[in-house]
Image (spheres, rainbow, N blue to C red):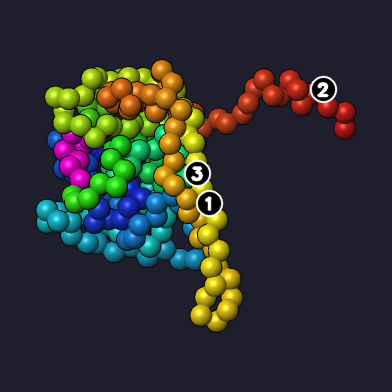
Amino acid sequence: MHILVTNDDGVQAPGLLALAQEMRKLGKVTVFAPDKNWSASGHVKTMERPLRVKEVLLADGTSAFASDGAPSDCVALPLLGLIEDQIDLVVSGINPNANLGHDVTYSGTVTAAMEAVIAGVKGIAVSLDSPEGFKGMLDYSTSAKIARRIAENVIADGMLDGVVVNVNVPYLKEVELKGYMVTRQGLRVYRDALDERIDPRGKPYFWIGGEAPTGVDEPGTDFGALRAGYVSITPLQLDLTHYKAMDVLKKWKF
């Protein structure tokens, strides 16, 4: 079993190290991640410039590959042959914040796993629902163990083609978790705001800011499961077609 571990927070992120250490219990691990933070990058693939790759050491002394490309590039490059050995599974994370509802379209963590699935390799994305405004070092130990258990199930039972497994873990100790829940995408509530400022040369520039997003707490959703203390496991499909809407469009007159 050869597992590729990646993320969108950068190759030296502590969540990546915790994930890699747990995945090593399942087989050979190659770590290939961006050399900087690409949070909220979405599904980016670099086409208009060359990509650089270098070998680096992680905090535990093990080797990893770092690229100046996006998270999706860090999956595409190994799968296209930069890593000679066949990769059987891609696990992306551990993101320090949850990826719920519409977050999955923004998330570099999730879209890195999507890149794997597009290439015909199983993909898992793992995120930790850390408390808002948390100070200090996050504890990734529980979420890393959960990631390993999810990976064990994917390895043993497989997964349907075109499906990304999106995992969100409450920020709790393992003994405090209520259990595991298979969920659907919930509804994120974004509270973005535009902040316009003037630079020293008198020209305007803009920040997209606002308050942290919330969500609709509904039973059976990823957001609802986390709020109830459960690990949320959401199967995401790459086919975004709204099939009922097709019937409406077929009635249009062109």
| Res 54 → quadrant | bottom left
Side of 194 where 213 appears, left or right: left
Instruction: Please name which of the two marks, 1 or 2, marks the residue nearer to the observer.
Output: 1
Q: Please name the residue that numbered disc 3 is placed on.
A: 191
Q: Which mark is residue 251?
A: 2
- Front position in the image: 210 or 32: 210
Q: Please name the residue that numbered disc 1 is placed on.
A: 193
Q: Where residue 189 sits: x, y (%)? A: 49, 36
Report the amino acid beneath label 2. Answer: Lys
Q: Indicate whether 221 appears above or below 7.
A: above
Q: Residues within 10 Å of mark 2 (few under 14, many from 20)?
A: few
State yes or no: discs 3 and 2 in contact (Cβ < 8 Å): no
**Viewport quadrant of the N terminus:** top left
Q: Indicate whether 34 appears above or below 254.
A: below
Label 1 to label 2, Cα distance in Å? 38 Å
Report the amino acid beneath label 3. Answer: Arg
Q: Indicate whether 92 appears above or below 41.
A: above
Q: Residues within 10 Å of mark 1 (few under 14, many from 20)?
A: few
Q: Which residues lie in the magenta part?
A: 138-144
Side of 253 where 143 appears, left or right: left
Res 201 visible: yes
State yes or no: discs 3 and 1 in contact (Cβ < 8 Å): yes
**Which of marks 2 and 3 precedes in the sequence?**
3
Q: Give me the residue at 53% from left, 59% from top.
A: 195
Report the amino acid beneath label 1. Answer: Ala
